Amino acid sequence: MKRKKQIIVSVTNDLVADNRVHKVCTSLEKMGFNILLVGRKLRHSEAIKRSYQTLRMRLFFTKGACFYAEYNVRLLLFLLFRKADVLLANDLDTLTANYFASKIKRAPVVYDSHEYFTEVPELIDRPRVKQFWEWLESRMLPNLKHCYTVCDSIAAVYHEKYGVSFNVVRNIPVSKNRLQLIENENQPKIILYQGAVNIGRGLEQAIKAMHFIEGAQLVIAGDGDIKQQLEELVRAEKLENKVRFTGRLSIDELAELTPTADLGLSIEEDLGLNYRFALPNKLFDYIGAGVPVLVSDLPEMKAIVEKYDIGAICNSHDPKNLANAVNEALNNSDKIKTWKTNLIQTSQELTWENEAEVLKGIFAEFL
């Protein structure tokens, strides 16, 4: 019997909520590869069960330069002594280990850039750290042959900067989880934000906007660097009855929560090119669940909303203006009817199965 080719996939998270990587691994498994997904295990990481193999490393450091250094050294040693036909690095923070392992083992490396890493808001005010990541990127990316990313804008930037062609694989939900239209009659409407609770996501403004929104509750589903700060803001603004935090949810828990929302928020601020070109996972999750959206006036998100007419575009993050946009989106029955009708058709077009055809084109040569 012919041996299946082995792909080792690596990420720096604990695997629990990384839906994009899970979909990629499942698609590659269906193509006929053996998959091993490597991440890390945190103190409060939940148990996971997948159809493919997983491995989570316990690390001494959990953040900062020491974490990235420890993870990449540990990952490099692991890759050197583990059989692999293909290495798949997710984001720049795993690429160093994969890059050197591919050189030593003479195994091909594929790079999945989930974002424009060197332009994330966390690096904007840290020029030395940003410069270091840019230096790493400049040493490795021009030598890569197999790359893909999440949107056309980021692909174009990388091509212009390094002369490297990037395919585009958007983070769209699988069709089996799609469109469950749920009516919440006689209940407060739900304004949902799901995803990382970090700076630049418009969450402070969304919380303050709740002063001017009645008959609705803001639900923030996720965890991140500023979650505690936002909880303190809610208490300071006396909005406990209007804002609810769920904490980080698993992929399955999110799949249950998202369709119950009346409006999905993706209101990133224009803090650097990474956010300017953002095409967030949550946007497609809202679409897949039949939830109209309110997005920032940023090119990639705006293009999706305008093309399919599935929600509104907010031109300002001022809390009063944001509240006006939310109220209009929640209470204009004619627009809501149009958006929900369009969401049915859009969800049939935007499927992971269609997106995965790009993956097949990238990985077919390794079979």
Image (tube, helix red, strand yellow):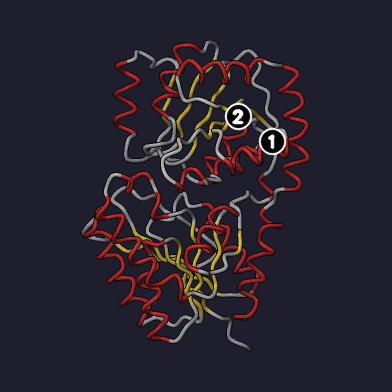
Q: How many marks?
A: 2
Residue at 48% x, 45% y is 250
Alpha carbons under labels 2 and 1: distance apart = 9 Å
Front-most of 184 and 164? 164
In the displayed image of the protein, which residue is found farthest to the front?
160
Q: Earlier in the sequence, mark 2 or mark 1?
A: 1
Label annotation for residue 306: 1
Q: Amino acid at mark 2?
A: Ile
Disc 1 packing (10 Å; few <14; some 14–19; many ≥20)? few
Q: Quick check: 296 left or right of 359?
A: left
**Residue 12 shown left or right of residue 155 in the figure:** left
Q: Which mark is residue 74?
A: none
- In the rendered image, which residue does mark 2 sit on? 313
Disc 2: CA contacts within 10 A as few (<14), some (14-19) or many (>=20): many
| Location of residue 124 in the rendering, given as x and y in whole percent from the top left corner | 33, 46
Cβ–Cβ under 8 Å for marks 2 and 1: yes
The quadrant in which residue 226 appears is top left
- Give the answer, above or below, for where 230 lies relative to 166: above
Classify mark 2: helix, strand or loop: strand
